[in-house]
Amino acid sequence: MFKDLIPPPGPPRGLALAQLVCRLGDGAYNICAALFFTRIVGLSPLQMSLGLTIGWSAALALSVPLGHLADRMGPRGTAVFLFVCAALSVTSFIFISSFVPFVIASCAYAVSQRGGSAAENALLAGLVPKDQVTRVRAFVQSSYNAGMTIGAGLGGLVLLFDTRAAYYAAFALNGFAFLVAAYVLRRLPAVAPVPAAPAGAGASGAKPVSRSVFRDGPYVLISVLNTFLLLYVPLVAVALPLWISEHTSAPVSLLSVMLMLNTVVVAFFQVRVSAGVKDLASATRYLIVGSFLLAGACLAFAFSGSWDSAWTAGILLVVAAGLMVVGEMMQAAGEWEVSFGLAPKGKTGQYQAFFGNGITVAEMLGPLVLTGLIVYWGAPGWILLGVMFVVVSFLMAPVIRWGGRVREEKDRLEQEFEAELRAAGTAPDTSAVADSRS
């Protein structure tokens, strides 16, 4: 089991290390941010929420252009640059004292963090063999959870001290973590940037394939459907605390046990669970099975509010949390294979950026949707949410097959066009990897 925590040497280990360090800082930030902005900076809760929403909206709007930049300029350099920008922007929170600077810093932080993550995924795709991408991505996700867990513990110490200096230290730690992650990524091999496709057509009429993710109908539809599956992400942080406190007899403190269960299980078992995903067909099966597990979790959550016994309600909640974390790991493994497998060569940056927008949308709209569905509607809302998970996964299956056929056809046309360019002596250099120390 412990061998699953240590990635293979080389790029996989460097990518996982960068993620571990980076998310360690984010974990501390997430625990401290709300109290820091309201109690230390002096913003109202409404101002804080509005500023963060504006920031994530900016990240949503600029993610695909930044992903395209990573493809054209090289993902390693882009990731390093954006992580340095994230370090500067999160550290700048220490110096703000009013709403407008807060909004500017929030936009810079959200854009650079999400853009850097998309570039990092493009770097992973360029450095790792295609059949190993999902496995390496699982190592990265395990590192993500481990980093967030450690960082949350450090953030808890900050809340224990509850002083201005302690909050400043947490934000400085986050900035330093981004710098360390940038340094780790800088030492990895570079992936050569992809030049712009030549205009025009070949002698036989072959044309370059469209390079924009927005024109890839199957991929766009898969990304939209996957956003609904990602509603499990804000579920634990937003809906569950309110559900436990208002609808069950279980103590609210049980939430910490459920959170610990989630993070520890993902850290230890994500790689092992992901081992069964080898291609689009197995990824589709994982998405469907994962959705049934999530639906089972929703059913257990719904019944947890039907018992007066705190023990019975607590057992149901823990069982639901266990089903949810296994379903989450299967869903994640399936979506990684699909998101990387359907992205065309040399365009992973913008494709991963677009696909990653799903998590941003889920985090922005999830609190409102889940609060209305679960907290105010109760058990029927849980059941409806579970049915939605299953229905969406079945809808994704034919779209994934469609996307596979479209990708094969586009790859064939691209190969024909490049062959004609090579025959004419005008083909661009498409070498995949350059020496990082050159």
Image (spheres, rainbow, N blue to C red):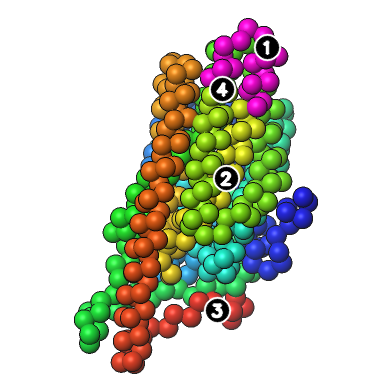
Measured in 3D between alpha carbons, the distance from the residue under mark 4 to the one under mark 1, in whole angstroms, is: 14 Å
The residue sitting at 78% across, 51% down in the picture is 2
Magenta span main SS: helix
* 2 or 4: tag closer to the N-terminus: 4
Looking at the rendered image, the disc whose residue lies closer to the viewer, 4 or 3, is 4
Measured in 3D between alpha carbons, the distance from the residue under mark 3 to the one under mark 1, in whole angstroms, is: 60 Å
* 4 or 3: tag closer to the N-terminus: 4
> Which residue does the numbered mark 2 point to in the structure image?
330
Check residue 310 for magenta coloring: yes
Mark sitting on residue 310? 1
* 4 or 1: tag closer to the N-terminus: 4
Q: Nearer the viewer, residue 435 or 159?
A: 435
> Which residue does the numbered mark 3 point to in the structure image?
434
The answer to the question of whether label 4 and label 1 lie on touching residues, with beta carbons closer than 8 A, is no
Q: Position of residue 267 (x, y in %)?
A: 68, 45
Dot 2 lies on which element?
helix
Dot 4 lies on which element?
helix
* 3 or 1: tag closer to the N-terminus: 1
| Corner quadrant of residue 136 | bottom right
Q: Position of residue 408 (x, y in %)?
A: 38, 68
Q: Amino acid at mark 3?
A: Ala
Q: Amino acid at mark 4?
A: Phe
* 1 or 2: tag closer to the N-terminus: 1
Q: Is residue 78 left or right of residue 4?
A: left
Q: Which residues are magenta?
A: 302-319
Q: Residues within 10 Å of mark 3 (few under 14, many from 20)?
A: few
Measured in 3D between alpha carbons, the distance from the residue under mark 4 to the one under mark 3, in whole angstroms, is: 51 Å
Q: Residues within 10 Å of mark 2 (few under 14, many from 20)?
A: many
| Corner quadrant of residue 315 | top right
